Each structure stands twice: as structure tokens, then as C-alpha cells.
Image: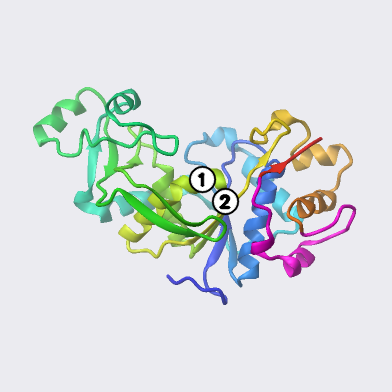
Amino acid sequence: MTTSETGSGAGRFAPSPSSDLHLGNLRTALLAWLFARSTGRAFRWRVEDLDVARSATDGVAEGQLADALALGLDVDGPVLRQSERQHHYAAAVERLGEDVYECFCTRREIAEASSAPHDGFRPYPGTCRDLTEEQRAERRRRRPAALRVRTDTDTFEVDDLLAGRVGGLVDDFVLRRGDGAWAYNLAVVVDDAATGVDQVVRGDDLLTSAPRQAWLAQRLGYRPPTYAHVPLAVNADGRRLAKRDGAVTLAELTAAGVSAQDVLARLAVSLRLATAGERVDVALLLSRFDPAALPREPWVVEG
């Protein structure tokens, strides 16, 4: 897999189907599309439903894609669902071989044993790293094991198109939880590689996860993607935008008489790609798109 600015590779948007996309999600989707199309890349769509019960996602994932299409964001290739790709994650763990080990620690035990938090989480202190087979067998009788990857570094650096060179902690992170669910850090790396995604555009709340994911990509033999972590949308109080903040989804806005084109224009103004009251479409926004000119502060969404 190669990274190219002249046509190969792909970008993507990968929402969790837990609720309708709000304005902040739609803005990030638009940015992911603009970054991809402006560099000649394909644009993929993935449903990240590993942590969402299928019964709770009926119609939600389809509605999310429909909202993106209503804005004019065309998608290449089939839509992937992570819940249908679990054998690929198992195969990746097999490839890691002896670097994978069982862990029986609870979150509380990790918190009590680890040092001060880094980037909002406590690094794994290595409690189960070198257990003997007898010790593992004894612990299996008490609780199911998670799977962790044995890392060979403390930090890893990534290049972000907006944040620059960013380093982050890489501990022995979880690949599969004790309940059998595959971890986000593993799934996104495997899925991006499988679909040719070499450009990841997403909210800057996920910036701290990029070093672990890039390290894992390299360990699995993939080239880490180029990253662009974009500012979030927040409410008037500075908190991350949520449905409780009023009419913030496309369906709610449409019901209030706001068209998809009006929503696109509002997003464009927030990105400094249009002036208030201007009618736009994605082709026009693409012709104006310049990553260097994007705002770097959160977008405050007011009613």
C-alpha cells in the first residue's frame, strides 16, 4: 500500500451507528470527503458497529449514509460493517504471534497499579506481561482474558496535516476485550489497510489514539496513513455537540424547514469556504478547499 497525492489510496468516514449524525459529525464527514477528493483519492464509508447491538442499529447506519449523500458526498465501493469482519481481526492477531498475551486485569486494578494518567488514560503497567502458563491457567478460572499486544517502544510519532508531528504513548494496549469484543485500535487499522485507506480525517478528540494505531499498522506490515484531526463542533458552553443541544441532525433541521443544501451552506461557512447566505454545492467547495486555510479552533454551534 502506498500513500500518494496523485490518485492512489483512499480516505474514509466511519461513524458508529448509535444515533443520527449531528452537525459536527456531518462537518467532519464533509472534511473527510474534501481531503480525499482534493488529493485524487477514493472515499470509503464504514459502519463501526462492534460496540453497538445490531438490533439498536436497524435503519441508523442507512440513515447516516443517506444524510451524507443528501449533502452531495458520493461514496466509492461497498459499505463495510465491522461486525461482519471479525474473522479478519482474528487473523491479524494470529499474525502478531507471540507478541500477543492474555491479560486478566480489571480497570480498577490497572488504575491502582499504573502511574499518573497520560492523555486521559492510564497506561498498562505490564502486570500480566510475563505470567507463567501456570499463573495464566489459575487466572482463567477466575475471569476471561483480554488480549494485549506486547509493544517494543514507549512512544510513537505520527505526522498530522493540521497538528504537525505528534508523539504519543504506546503501551501494551488491548486487542480483544475480556468479553470477546475486538478493540477499536485493532479494527480500524485492519479495516483501513483492507480498503486502501491511507488518509484518515476525523475529530481531534481521537488524536491521542493515532500513535498506537500507526504503531500497530507498522507492526502488521502496513504503511501508517496520513492523519488530519479536525476541530470538533461544540455548543455554546464549549461542550461537545450532542442531540440534547436542540435541532442538530439533518432530519430535525429538515422538519424545521431547513434543507440539506442550507445545512451544507452552514457547514461551508463554518469552514470559511463560503459567505453567509451563499448557495453552494460540494463541487464548488472542493474547488475552494485549502487545508492550510481551515479554522483550527472548535466550531461553536449556536441555535
Q: Position of residue 176 (x, y in %)?
A: 34, 40
Which residue is drawn at the image coordinates 71% and 65% (left, top)? Answer: 289
Against 53, is 274 above or below?
Answer: below
- Classified by dominant secondary structure, the portion drawn in magenta counts as loop
Q: Position of residue 34 (x, y in %)?
A: 67, 62
101 vs 209, left or right, is: left
Label disc, if present, on residue 206 of the rendered structure: 1
Dot 2 amino acid type: Arg
Q: Is residue 51 visible?
A: yes
Residue 196 colored magenta?
Answer: no
Residue 279 colored magenta?
Answer: yes
Name the residue beneath numbered marker 2: 202
Q: Are marks 2 and 1 in contact (CB under 8 Å)?
A: yes
Query: Where does the N terminus fall, quadrant-wise?
Result: bottom left
Which residue is drawn at the image coordinates 86% and 43% (left, top)? Answer: 258
Mark 2, other Cα within 10 Å: few <14 / some 14–19 / many ≥20: many
Mark 1, other Cα within 10 Å: few <14 / some 14–19 / many ≥20: few
Among the 4 quarters of the image, the one containing residue 280: bottom right
Instruction: Say which element carries label 1.
Output: helix
| Nearer to us in this view, 238 or 286 | 238
Which residue is drawn at the image coordinates 14% and 35% (left, top)? Answer: 131
Q: Is residue 85 visible?
A: no
Among the 4 quarters of the image, the one containing residue 251: top right
